[in-house]
Amino acid sequence: MKPVYKRNITKHLWSLPIVAILLFGCQQNTTPLIDKNATPETRHLYAKLFQLQGKKILFGHQDDLAYGVNWRYEPGRSDVKEIVGDYPAVMGWDIGHIEHGREANLDAVPFSLMKEFIISSAKKGSINTISWHLDNPATGGSSWDTTAAVAHILPTGHLHTKFVGWLDQVAAFLDDLRFEDGTPVPILFRPFHELNGNWFWWCKPFCTQEDYIALWQFTVQYLKDVKGLHHLIYVYNTNNFVEEADFMDRYPGDDYVDMMSFDTYQLLDIEGMTPETLQASSEQFKSHLQANLDVLQRYAHQHGKLMALAETGFEAIPSADWWTTVLYDAIAPYDISYVLLWRNQGELDGKMHYYAPYPGHISETDFKKFFQGTKMALQSTLDSLNIYNRTQ
Ligand code: BMA
């Protein structure tokens, strides 16, 4: 028996390279998670996201379960679900004000509820992503107070201890996000976002490239190696950009980033809007979005990272077919893992501030079409894929 077995192996050795090409040849260049000790659920999620690349675009919405247009904190409610019958595949949250140990975030979402929403939606298959609109540590002002602060919170700065205390608060919140069996819920963490804008104190005009990168690297190392958090997938994020160089200018390096992304909104004042100005604005938005997605995709593939459109939308969606003719048309050709719409606050400072439609909205029918026979995926799709590879 033995010699026959040996002969057969030798006979089939020639086919090994072909098998290898079939298995690996068509895949993108991918890198492992930056956290070598990432939990099994986090590693599984990360691998699944690579498998889904190009096939599905997960749909996300900020604060989806917390409130919507004309309602607040009603269990099970979601503006998205009321129209399409399913919850978002990606749930976005912001932990601004966690640094002060407050009860609620900067938009009044209680952290205790946020925690419940994160755990319960993960149990149903959704992925949670967290951003952090942290206050200015130098002044006590908000994220939008652009007084110089980054250099002061680095290890050599006089506010370093204060900042580390803030990171301890972040770590405690993140560490508390666990399934019933105690396993941490994987989180896409997107700190110091829109870095090339000019509105947050960590943005380009208010700190050097070196200091931004040092802040990012310190934060990752601290959460991962000092606090021992191993359920985070780190998301690098710029705002939309004109110059390609602006996208990678402050990139903290392949050892510090798992996913690359940018944010962009269609901006048009609804007052005085005409069909012509709307059309022109939509065309311009679409072409700029695609130009930026070209750049994102090139760098993400080159560096073996995942990619996402981390925030987008058109405030109050004044266009009935925006979902299919503008957003889907623009993003469908790309390998982004997800697209996330910003929050449905409702009225804010005298105008309507929401990015997903609600029942009765002019774009309701088109929003349903956006998910029919397209690459867009909602919670139930992820649930059926068991993205965290959990048995319970
Ligand atoms: C902005 C607006 C603000 C909000 C902030 C953080 O885009 O929605 O009202 O406070 O995001 O969520």
Image (cartoon, rainbow, N blue to C red):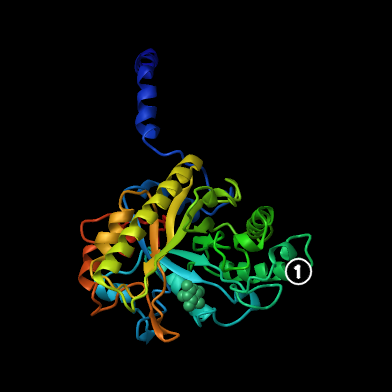
In the foreground, 111 or 120: 111
Q: Residue at x 49, y 63 (%)?
A: 185
Other residues around mark 1 within 10 Å, as few (<14) / some (14–19) / many (≥20): some
State whether label 1 is within 8 Å of ligand 1.
Answer: no
Q: Quadrant of the C terminus?
A: bottom left
Circle 1: residue type: Leu
Please tell me in which quadrant of the rendered image residue 79 appears: bottom left
In the foreground, 211 or 8: 211
Across and down, in percent, residue 55 comes to: 31, 49
Q: Quadrant of the N terminus?
A: top left
Q: Is residue 101 above or below residue 54?
A: below
Please indicate whether residue 62 sits to the left or right of residue 198 in the image. Answer: left
Identify residue for label 1.
159
Residue 27 visible in image: yes
Across and down, in percent, residue 102 comes to: 60, 81
Please tell me in which quadrant of the rendered image residue 75 appears: bottom left
Please indicate whether residue 11 sits to the left or right of residue 98 in the image. Answer: left
In the foreground, 124 or 341: 341
